[in-house]
Image (spheres, rainbow, N blue to C red):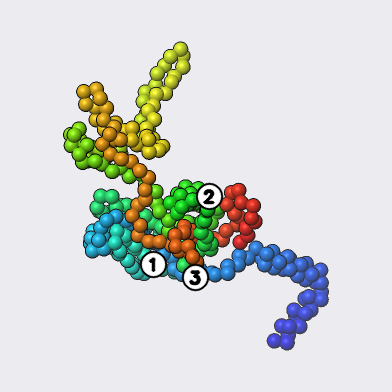
Amino acid sequence: MNKFIKNIVGFSLRNRFFVFFMLAVLTVGGVTAYLHTPIEAFPDVTNTQIIIVSEWNGRSAEEVERFVTTPLEISMNGVQKKTSVRSITMFGLSVIKIIFDDDVEDFFARQQVNNMLRTVSLPDGVEPEVQPPYGPTGEVFRYWLKSPHRDSRSLLTYQNWVIDRQLRSVPGVADVVAFGGQEKIYEITADPIKLAKYDITPLELYQAAAQSNINVGGDVIEKNGQAYVVRGIGLLDNIQDIGNIIIENIDGTPILVKNVASVRETSLPRVGQVGLDDKDDVVEGIVVMRKGETPRKCWPGSKTRCTS
């Protein structure tokens, strides 16, 4: 051992410039590695997991379990390198969580799950959604909306159509979840007496309203060496447009929605509510980061500087 140490010391003394050069290289490499090493305050050490959420509105938990959850679980049993399949079934909702082995990457897991989903036969209207890849420590930001002039219905609409889209444009954001508020809808309330007067069924009223909210493409008209594209604009903008939908034409007289029904702005039935301090109806949002990533900048237009 002493001879080995003497040889090292002797080599270092005979090659001083080489030893100093290697020391400088190691120092630069160490500093560079230290500056670029990622640091996570809450490192995610959990296994790769895929969550499948399916909605079947208006159905009991027993029906959802029998016709949605059970077929999905049976199909997911064929996924490779999984460790367990767990499920939660509630009124109108099915949640399935698939946990994989330690060495399985998210891309492989999603590919396996998506391939198996194509083989499942589910009831009409049920479309299972694979949730974005985020871990149990992915929640990084929570906020709530307030306004002296807007109610919770308007705030939730602003959240879904403006704030949600801006936050999702931030690199690393996997999902934005909103709670509370009232989801805005336009409700058509039919008058049975007026429907009977014009011999119109509620189904015909529904079909007329559903088919009128679309744009229709037409043909191309060529004139004087130019081509003009013809299309029909049918997207509805307000309550007046809904009331002016034509249901049926009787002897040249159009029967409109407003002739047999009333249209008003309302909300979907509420299944929950969020309160904060002395406010009993607020809109709350949660930003969830993608697994293994951290936010590097703020959303567009923000004057606040964000770092990881």
**Is 143 situated left or right of 110 in this image?**
right
What's the residue at 63%, 60% (across, down)? Answer: 307
Query: What percent of the width, then of the height, locates residue 139?
Result: 50, 64
At a point 49% along the width and 51% down the height, the residue shown is: 150
- The answer to whether residue 116 is visible is no
Q: Residue furthest bottom?
A: 2
Residue 45 - label: 3
Quadrant showing the N terminus: bottom right
| SS under mark 1 | strand
According to the picture, the residue beneath numbered tag 1 turns out to be: 99
State if disc 3 and disc 2 touch (CB < 8 Å). no
Q: Position of residue 10 (x, y in %)?
A: 79, 79
- What kind of residue is marked 1? Ile
Q: Residues within 10 Å of mark 3 (few under 14, many from 20)?
A: few
Q: Which residue is denoted by mark 2 in the rendering?
A: 166
Q: Secondary structure at mark 2?
A: helix
In which quadrant of the rendered view does residue 243 lie?
top left
**Relative depth, front residue between 102 and 136:** 136
**x 40%, y 18%: residue:** 221
Q: Residues within 10 Å of mark 2 (few under 14, many from 20)?
A: some
Q: Report the disc number at residue 194.
A: none
Q: Closer to the camera: disc 2 or disc 1? A: 2
Q: Is residue 10 visible?
A: yes
